[in-house]
Image (cartoon, grey):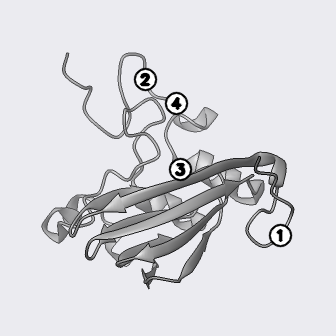
Amino acid sequence: FFQPKKNVFFVEPKAQRGIHCRFGMEGVVAEAHWDGSRNMIAQFHGRRRYVLVDPDNTCDMYLLAKNHPSGRHSEVDWSNPDGWENFPKFPTMPAHEVVQRPGDFLYLPTYYLHYIVSIDTNYQCNTRSGKDDRQTKIVNECTPGFSKNRKPAPGKLLGAQKPAG
């Protein structure tokens, strides 16, 4: 039924994972994280604020361990500057900000870290198309559990407390 061809939206058509739509209410936050594939996002209604961080700055994000329930996510609460003193590299980390409005498309490269805030009621759809491995090494080195150098200790989750239960 749906046979995408290679173009600006589908870099690797055979690796395309369908189209996903998301709805957001004002103030809803998607905590900072990275995705392991290319992402093309179309905004259809409302606005979303994206804060984007180049994968070269992954180590300044204080990422949770691979085996943590929120693995690939930043341990830093981006919406609470009072807590940033525990993460000395975070406040000076270079970042880019964009507000996506209806009709806008945003290309999010593989491993680009992103924090999203819904400014008002909104919906967007996205599709993923393969991955670009050029920054895999730095992301693996800075995400506990992805590299031989940063393995979680047995019975412990790096970067966070062990969950109760």
Residue situated in front as seen by the camera: 1 or 38? 1
Q: Position of residue 105 (x, y in %)?
A: 58, 78
Distance between mark 4 and mark 2 Cα atoms:
6 Å
**Which of pointers 1 and 3 lies earlier in the amino acid sequence?**
1
Q: Position of residue 61 (x, y in %)?
A: 42, 59
Distance between mark 1 and mark 2 Cα atoms:
44 Å
Which amino acid type corresponds to the residue marked 3 in the rendered image? Cys
50 up-or-down from 10: above or below? below
Q: Residues within 10 Å of mark 1 (few under 14, many from 20)?
A: few
Q: Which mark is residue 20?
A: none
Residue situated in front as seen by the camera: 133 or 85? 133
Which amino acid type corresponds to the residue marked 2 in the rendered image? Ala
**Which of pointers 3 and 2 lies earlier in the amino acid sequence?**
3
CB contact under 8 Å: marks 1 and 2: no
SS at circle 1: loop
Q: Which residue is label 4 attached to?
A: 151
CB contact under 8 Å: marks 3 and 2: no
Q: Which residue is label 3 attached to?
A: 142
16 up-or-down from 124: above or below? above
Q: Identify the residue at horizontal 66%, vertical 53% (top origin).
A: 37
SS at circle 4: loop
CB contact under 8 Å: marks 4 and 2: yes
CB contact under 8 Å: marks 1 and 3: no
Q: Which residue is label 2 attached to?
A: 153
Distance between mark 4 and mark 1 Cα atoms:
39 Å
Q: Residues within 10 Å of mark 3 (few under 14, many from 20)?
A: many
Q: Which residue is label 1 attached to?
A: 7
Distance between mark 4 and mark 3 Cα atoms:
11 Å
Q: Of circles 1 and 3, which is in front?
A: 1
